[in-house]
Amino acid sequence: MMLELRDVSVARGGVPVLDGVGLVLGPGEAMVLRGPNGSGKTTLLRAVSGLQPVLAGEVSGAERVAYSGHADGLKANLSVAENLAFWAAAFGTRGIEAAMEAYALAPLSDRWAGNLSAGQKRRLGLARMLVTGRPVWVLDEPTVSLDAASVALFAAAVRGHLGAGGAALIATHIDLGLSEARVLDVAAHRAMAPLPGSDEAFL
Ligand SMILES: Nc1ncnc2c1ncn2[C@@H]1O[C@H](COP(=O)(O)OP(=O)(O)OP(=O)(O)O)[C@@H](O)[C@H]1O
């Protein structure tokens, strides 16, 4: 088992958004999170990654997670290669070549990250996953700003990661072409809102 959620509830801004979420990801397995805007995917992924506490339930494997959120977390005044080298050092891994190659970053190697286009920044942010050495990738809308060719690079990187025994949990609104991924629709776990007119003063 790489990642397991048991009966997890999460809240955002003090308001419960999801209840009773359970999932298990083993080596080589991927799961896609679906659900309408505001349904709680980001909140759940942050809790899975240990960035916020769960309201109830348990998460096992958060220490194995590399998280990629909406912000790319780039160092604007470092080059592309320097950003990857920085993260490799931070995670205690070696070598950035595989990450550079997976996202076709070699031609951009010496460019400042701050000067990259939105899609190029996203490619660099996703390449970071490869240098973390972490086996569980948790990715929140990874394909925002990516063109079709870059989406294909991303899908190939995820496939390679799964093939090497890793796992991935991905919130996305688009079809990534990862037919092997299971799907979890978080709408089924929406936390129960109080019914209109059920103010306890009237009960
Ligand atoms: N800082 C905050 N304080 C209060 N409520 C918040 C805060 N951030 C998000 N929310 C609310 O929490 C709910 C869940 O948001 P979340 O970002 O997890 O949804 P999502 O499924 O990822 O949405 P999307 O598909 O639009 O990215 C939404 O109703 C959102 O408005």
Image: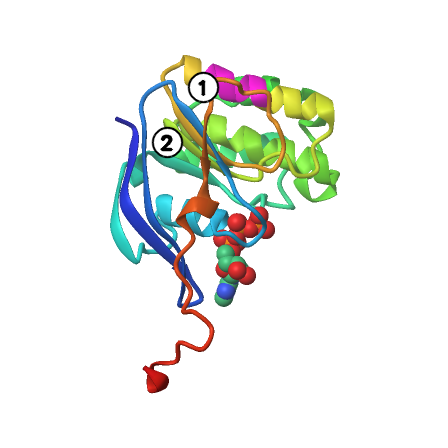
Mark 1 nearby-residue class (10 Å; few <14, some 14–19, many ≥20): many
Would you say the magenta stretch is mainly helix, strand or loop?
helix
The label shown at residue 92 is 2
Q: What colour scheme was applied to this rendering of the protein?
A: rainbow
Q: Nearer the viewer, mark 1 or mark 2?
A: 1
Residue 90 sits inside the magenta stretch? no
- The amino acid pointed to by label 2 is Gly
In this picture, residue 184 sits left or right of residue 78: left
Q: Earlier in the sequence, mark 1 or mark 2?
A: 2
Q: Reply above or below: 193 against 67.
A: below
Q: Quadrant of residue 118?
A: top right
Residue that numbered label 1 is attached to? 161
Q: Reply above or below: 149 against 118.
A: above
Q: Quadrant of residue 14?
A: bottom left
Q: Position of residue 56 (x, y in %)?
A: 26, 55
Label 1 C-beta lies within 8 Å of the nearest ligand 1 atom? no
Residue sitting nearer the eye, 125 or 37: 37
Magenta-drawn segment: 155-160
Can residue 97 be seen by looking at this rendering? no
**CB within 8 Å, label 1 to label 2:** no
Q: Residue at x 54, y 20 (%)?
A: 178
